[in-house]
Image: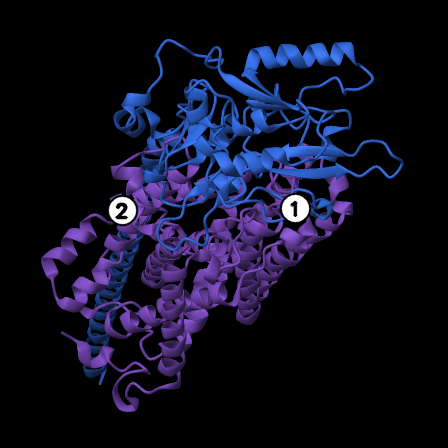
């Protein structure tokens, strides 16, 4: 559940460098730290008062909300979390007919298996046993892959800061939790729409609410299983897709999908040298065969030429011999004839 | 050494330094440096249009994502010549390796501009490793491959400086370096695609597939081949007095590259189609995003594939060059789509990212830097021709 799923060079480099955070070797499937905390946002109770936004900014020492809390025009645009607003409340369903509008609070969902932690090349994120996902700015080089990867668009970056920019996100008020307090937003909610507690207990509470009020709720807890589950969970009476939540895409943790390909990497490292040297040997052999074939052909051609020349030489010699014989014969015949003629006369 | 023949480049000698080329590139480079000055004094917000929803813009989408793909010509040509015995392509290995080295150098420059705290670039290796991250693998591979490309680019330097012992040493490492380069390239070219596997909801389903690492690798091979043709088109004009090989041989090399590019693009088109079929996403082609996807697939993959085929069959160099330029633009379009156009496709339109003029300027400045560096090196070292002392040697 912490991000120690090492597909890649994990064995060698990873284990050596991050040995201190390695999990127990015998555990194959870690279901998460027992008793870890979470929060439940019941959107059927939320009235969009933004008390949570104000409280969040106070406990985190961030500049106060830009638009006053009683200004309803803030809901005219859909906002997202920023480096100074770690949580924002949006209105997603605007009922004209007097039915209550539907609001949802956005913040880091504190995934059971966080993408941000998996994709960080500097290991700057940590899933704590208490549930919150923490970020360690002293390790961050600012690649912003975490901001890119988050499926909830919950991470923000301090683009204004030229030299020491940080990723900014909800910490689930980790320090307050350690002191036995509740997160600032949960304490501030006047409607009881935000419940803080052990995650398992929250799931029981949520199922109980659905069972008691089947007409009020959709029979689903967003975050119980989505992308491997989250610490922040959402209950709703309207379809989750209307609340800008991707329901039903996959229950597989995104880190498992993200790192699945890295398993191929050791294969490439181990198989390629042999394969490529084989190809190199093929091309070399091809050249060698071509060269020896060429040499053979040349030798054969030379031999054939030589033989031809020999034959021609022999034929010429034969011809010369015959010519000579013929000449001798002719001379003899001529001499004989002359002798005969001389005798006759 | 033999500087007499090498110094005859268009920018040196008679005309002096004040050539139009030097003036324009000087202005671009000084402007780029000034913008980078603003970036490190006033932050990324003052220079870029990056946002919390679009944390990666042009500097990642072009300088890193496209840069790595377009620099693939180095490993493609060196493997073909040294491993697969295609010796006839030897004259293009040096320019391709130099283009590759400069390309990867740009990748690092782009990264240094883009990272929030660039001086922490070595952190994954020396301080706190995140080996679960695809980016960790990319960083490791790029660092190693940049080193390999650097060593592979040193023979011309040693020949230029007359360091015979060093030249022989590097020459004896050719096969090992080529194999290492091919391993590292296979890994990081594909892992650049794997970086997006974490975002099935944020990247449009037509671009998102579990095969995206293979898509990235195959398209990078096509991009590398196309880049070698484009680079040859420019450098053989600029350095024509240095080129030793005959016009016929140069054209034959280009037609060979065109044929390889046609086959690679056809394979790429096939696996892209398989990607849609596997996820059964045919209906998405009828949407607006589908039309945009088809622009990429038909206009920048199928079209250049056909043009390369015709160019090869009918021996038309101009057509091959047109196809190469289209392919290069197509790869950039694909990397832009994946990293910021089809990424966040379902976000409200008021959050859309469009690069700022300063991001574009810095990118152009980086490219200019590479062109100037290539020009200087090719004018001083044996890149476009074989050094007389080392003819026919690895």
Q: Which residue is mark 1?
A: B345
Q: In blue, which chain?
A: A
For the residues labelled 1 and 2, say whether their Cβ atoms are less than 8 Å apart: no
Task: Note whether B186 is above or below A204 in the view shown.
Answer: below
Q: Which residue is mark 2?
A: B177
**Mark 1–mark 2 distance (CA, rounded to whole Å):** 41 Å
| Pointer 1 chain | B
**Numbered label attached to residue A74:** none
Inspect this view and state whether residue B145 appears: yes
Q: Residue B360 location in percent, x, y?
A: 49, 65
Q: Quadrant of residue A118?
A: top left
Q: Quadrant of residue A18?
A: top left
| Pointer 2 chain | B
Chain B appears in which tint?
purple
Which tag, 1 or 2, sits closer to the chain's start? 2
Question: Residue, x 78% and y 46% (percent of image)?
Answer: B286
Query: Who is closer to the viewer here, B4 or A81?
Result: A81
Q: Residue B74 location in percent, x, y?
A: 37, 55
Inspect this view and state whether residue B390 appears: no
SS at circle 2: helix
- In the displayed structure image, the side of residue A237 where residue B7 appears, left or right: left
Q: Residue A333 location in percent, x, y?
A: 23, 73
Q: Residue B244 location in percent, x, y?
A: 32, 73
Q: How is the image coloured?
A: by chain
Q: Viewer-nearest of labels 1 and 2?
A: 1
Task: Note whether B394 is above or below A148 in the view shown.
Answer: below
Question: Residue, x 29% and y 50% (percent of image)?
Answer: B119
Query: Who is closer to the viewer here, B48 or B239?
Result: B48
SS at circle 1: loop
């Amino acid at each position: 559940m912490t991000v120690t799923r090492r597909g890649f060079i994990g064995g060698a480099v990873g284990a050596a460098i991050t040995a201190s955070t390695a999990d127990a070797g015998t555990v194959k499937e870690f279901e998460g730290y027992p008793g870890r905390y979470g929060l439940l946002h019941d959107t059927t109770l939320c009235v969009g008062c933004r008390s949570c936004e104000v409280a969040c900014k106070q406990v985190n020492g961030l500049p106060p909300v830009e638009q006053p809390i009683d200004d309803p025009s803030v809901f005219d645009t859909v906002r997202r979390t920023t480096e100074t607003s770690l949580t924002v409340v949006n209105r997603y369903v605007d009922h004209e007919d007097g039915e209550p509008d539907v609001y949802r609070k956005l913040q880091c969902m504190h995934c059971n298996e966080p993408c941000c932690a998996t994709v960080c090349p500097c290991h700057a994120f940590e899933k704590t046993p208490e549930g919150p996902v923490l970020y360690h700015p002293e390790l961050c080089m600012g690649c912003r892959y975490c901001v890119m990867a988050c499926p909830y668009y919950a991470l923000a970056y301090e683009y204004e800061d030229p030299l020491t920019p940080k990723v900014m996100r909800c910490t689930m008020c980790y320090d307050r939790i350690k002191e036995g307090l509740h997160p600032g937003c949960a304490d501030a909610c006047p409607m009881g729409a935000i419940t803080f507690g052990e995650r398992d207990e929250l799931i029981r509470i949520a199922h109980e609410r659905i069972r008691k009020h089947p007409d009020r709720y959709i029979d689903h807890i967003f975050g119980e299983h989505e992308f491997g589950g989250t610490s922040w969970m959402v209950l709703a009476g309207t379809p989750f897709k209307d609340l800008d939540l991707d329901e039903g895409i996959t229950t597989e943790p995104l880190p498992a999908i993200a790192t699945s390909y890295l398993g191929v990497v050791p294969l490439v490292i181990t198989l390629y040298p042999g394969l490529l040297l084989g190809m190199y040997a093929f091309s070399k052999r091809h050249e060698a065969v071509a060269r020896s074939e060429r040499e053979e052909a040349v030798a054969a051609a030379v031999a054939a030429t030589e033989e031809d020349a020999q034959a021609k030489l022999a034929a010429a010699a034969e011809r010369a011999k015959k010519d000579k014989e013929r000449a001798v014969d002719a001379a003899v015949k001529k001499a004989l004839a002359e002798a005969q003629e001389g005798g006759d006369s | 050494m033999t500087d007499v023949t090498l110094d005859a480049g268009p920018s040196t000698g008679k005309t002096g330094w004040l050539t139009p080329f030097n003036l324009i590139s000087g202005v671009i480079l000084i402007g780029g440096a000034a913008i980078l000055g603003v970036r490190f004094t006033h932050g990324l917000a003052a220079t870029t249009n990056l946002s919390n929803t679009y944390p990666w813009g042009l500097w990642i989408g072009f300088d890193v994502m496209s840069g790595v793909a377009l620099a693939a010509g180095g490993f493609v040509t060196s493997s073909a010549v040294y491993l697969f015995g295609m010796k006839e392509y030897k004259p293009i290995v040096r320019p391709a390796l130099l283009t590759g080295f400069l390309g990867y150098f740009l990748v690092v420059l782009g990264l240094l501009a883009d990272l929030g705290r660039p001086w922490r670039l070595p952190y994954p290796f020396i301080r706190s490793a995140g080996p679960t991250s695809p980016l960790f693998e990319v960083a490791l591979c790029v660092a190693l491959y940049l080193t390999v490309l650097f060593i592979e680019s040193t023979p011309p330097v040693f020949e230029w400086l007359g360091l015979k012992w060093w030249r022989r040493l590097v020459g004896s490492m050719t096969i090992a370096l080529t194999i290492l380069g091919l391993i590292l390239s296979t890994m990081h070219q594909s892992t650049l695609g794997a970086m997006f596997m974490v975002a099935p909801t944020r990247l449009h389903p037509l671009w998102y597939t579990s095969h995206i690492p293979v898509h990235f690798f195959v398209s990078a091979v096509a991009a590398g081949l196309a880049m070698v043709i484009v680079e040859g088109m420019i450098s053989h004009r600029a350095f024509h007095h240095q080129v030793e090989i005959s016009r016929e041989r140069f054209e034959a090399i280009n037609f060979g590259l065109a044929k390889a590019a046609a086959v690679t693009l056809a394979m790429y088109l096939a696996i892209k189609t398989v990607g849609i079929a596997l996820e059964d996403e045919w209906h998405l082609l009828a949407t607006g995003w589908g039309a945009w996807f088809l622009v990429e697939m038909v206009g920048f993959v199928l079209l250049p594939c056909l043009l390369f085929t015709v160019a090869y069959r009918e021996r038309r160099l101009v057509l091959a060059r047109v196809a190469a330029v289209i392919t290069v633009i197509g790869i950039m379009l694909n990397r832009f789509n994946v990293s910021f156009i089809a990424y966040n496709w379902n976000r409200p339109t008021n959050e859309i990212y469009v690069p700022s003029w300063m991001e574009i300027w810095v990118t152009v400045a980086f490219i200019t830097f590479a062109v100037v560096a290539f020009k200087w090196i090719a004018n001083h070292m044996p890149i476009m021709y074989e050094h007389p002392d080392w003819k026919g040697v690895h």
